[in-house]
Amino acid sequence: MIEHLNNLGISALAEVEQAEDLQALDVIRVKYLSKKGEISLLMGKLRDLPQEERPVFGQKVNETKALVEKALYDKKEVLENIELLKTLENEKIDVTLPGYQFYQGSIHPLSQVIEDVEDLFVGLGYEVAEGPELENDHYNFEMMNLAKDHPARAMQDSFYTDENMLLRTHTSPVQARTMLAKKGQPLRIICPGKVYRRDNDDPTHSHQFMQMEGLVIEKGLNFANLKDALLKMARHLFGPERGIRLRPSYFPFTEPSVEVDVSYIKKDGTIGYIEVLGAGQVHPNVLSMGGYDPEVYQGFAFGIGIERIAILKYNIDDIRHFYTNDLRFLAQFKGVGQ
Ligand code: PHE
């Protein structure tokens, strides 16, 4: 019996030694150590032995059991470690490999300029207003003090869809629409949007371009308030060292009217000026047509060409680049002004 026990012990240990995975190990455990396992069964045979041999044999069985248990335990640890290493090997991530390339778009330069100007004026208490691109002659011209036969209409002649409707020639009709909507209340608005004119498509002109209108109507406004707003805008867009120059001009909807130039340093170090926008104090006719008493309320307005600003800001040589959506052009504006 002792010999049988020894043999069982030896073969159990050998099997444990050779087991290749945790499953195999479990099979061995069941085979030898479970209730009906071979070593356990020997305990049942104790009764067949003479009384005096029983304690020694019992102890032997327990020792063998403990040996096999320890071998199983140790082997289990080894196999588990091997398995872990395998998993680590399979799921290894090489952090030095280049990542996947995601193409990230960028904000269109014209949108960047609009957002930039909006940022400034919203901070100054202006609201952003919008109007339709297909506009009534009434709002586009008449409410802006350009009667039917006004010669200044020729400056902005446009695309009519019928006698009364046209693609708006400027963002100024949003002035008229907002005035009527505000019903005589003071207002501060800016209105970005597309405008259309019968113009040659050449490197500096396009039949479609963008403007941003500004309009303030309050009591006690004067020309200095307009100048202040314009200077703030020039410096916000082009830098704090810039100055502005106002030249007398003419628009039917403002009186007096000005063209606004922004200063820049020329190559030879002297100061030059570039025209960037038109502005003026709101004409009394426009105020009263919009529902404001010109004796009580004053207003100022300005109209910026968005492309013009972008061209100056980013040194662009052809206005058509803005519309052709060539990614080589657009990708240059990634992160600029954002
Ligand atoms: N609407 C004018 C234009 O398109 C610009 C402008 C707006 C001028 C507001 C003065 C005041 O040329």
Image: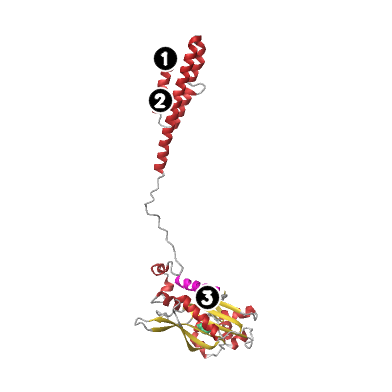
Segment colored magenta: 108-123
The CA distance from mark 3 to mark 1 is: 101 Å
Q: Tag 1: residue type?
A: Glu
Q: Can residue 157 be spotted in the picture?
A: no
Please state which of the two labelled residues, at mark 3 or mark 2, is closer to the viewer: 2
Q: Residue at x 45, y 29 (%)?
A: 73
Q: Tag 3: residue type?
A: Pro
Q: Which residue is mark 3?
A: 192
Which numbered tag is attached to residue 249?
none
Q: Can residue 113 be found in the magenta stretch?
A: yes
Q: Which residue is mark 1?
A: 3
Q: Secondary structure at mark 2?
A: helix
The numbered mark, 3 or 1, whose residue comes first in the sequence reads 1
Residue 298 relative to residue 83: left or right: right
Which numbered tag is attached to residue 15?
2
Of residues 232 and 261, which is closer to you in this image? 232
Q: Secondary structure at mark 1?
A: helix
* Callout 2: CB less than 8 Å from ligand 1: no
Of residues 220 and 100, which is closer to you in this image? 220
